[in-house]
Amino acid sequence: MSVEVTPLKGIPMVREGDDIAALIVEAANRQGLRWVDKDVVVVTQKIVSKAEGRIVRLDDVEPSAFAHHVAVSMEKDPRVAELVLRETARIIRMKGRALIVETRHGHVCANAGIDQSNVREGYVTLLPVDPDKSAEGIRKHLEVLTGKRLAVIITDTWGRAWRMGQVDFAIGVSGMNPFRDYRGETDMTGHTLVVTNIAVADELAAAAELVKGKAEGVPVVIIRGYDYPEGDGGAASLVRPLEEDLFR
């Protein structure tokens, strides 16, 4: 198996109400890319949030007393701290400048995924309300426009609990099972695999970041050649249930 990871260039700055699928197809046409069945379209969360109006003007935010307390202790803008708290279901850790929370989606990440990069000064973006639903909407429209059977992954960049550095993770998935489950199969020596269940959606998200970069203005990547498991599931199924989580 060989896999191609192609950055899709030429997508303009996205604004509220823009049609992400249409922008992707237009950019692909300009790039001379021909669609094939089982292409994976990896989309940066930032443009989805912008298109869905998940942008907040900081001057419109009134911080609570607790937000002011968090801001002082963690050297944050109290308005940003207030937005983080609003998007948070549970605070996991507050240490130094790190504010690790469980979002209302169930994801565990820093600052509830709120970001000030690649957005106008004085504004921040929030995560999509339902990233799996967002991925589904983009996928269905792409399939109508291209006539092909596709998968869509929405990604964001987060740190990892046991390792330094950040990696792109899948926060929204549609058109594919986010796992490749080997449990019950046998390895090369005949041993039955018991726990191997690979989070392929996260692996594809990380692979896409290699050609996107953070400052090149490439928010969409096309991955071709990976025979992903088709089906449902969504990125929500990637979140480890609390009762199985040894670290929360």
Image (cartoon, rainbow, N blue to C red):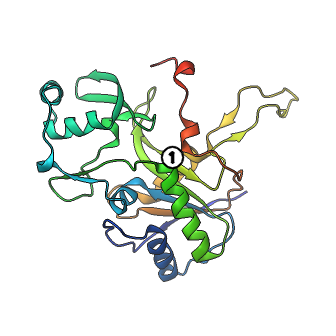
- The picture places residue 223, in percent across and down from the top left corner, at 59, 61
Q: Amino acid at mark 1?
A: Ala
- The picture places residue 134, in percent across and down from the top left corner, at 48, 56
Q: Is residue 3 left or right of residue 159?
A: right
Residue depicted at 71% across the width and 27% down the height: 195
Q: Residue 49 versus residue 74: which sits nearer the camera? A: 49
Which residue lies under the disc numbered 1?
Answer: 170
Residue 25 visible? The answer is yes
Q: Residue 214 versus residue 60: which sits nearer the camera? A: 60
- Give residue 51's quadrant in the image: bottom left
> Can you say whether 158 is above or below 207 in the image?
above
Q: Is residue 134 left or right of residue 175?
A: left
Residue depicted at 51% across the width and 22% down the height: 242
- Give residue 10's quadrant in the image: bottom left
Crowding near pointer 1: few (<14 within 10 Å), some, many (20+)? many
- The picture places residue 183, in percent across and down from the top left corner, at 77, 32
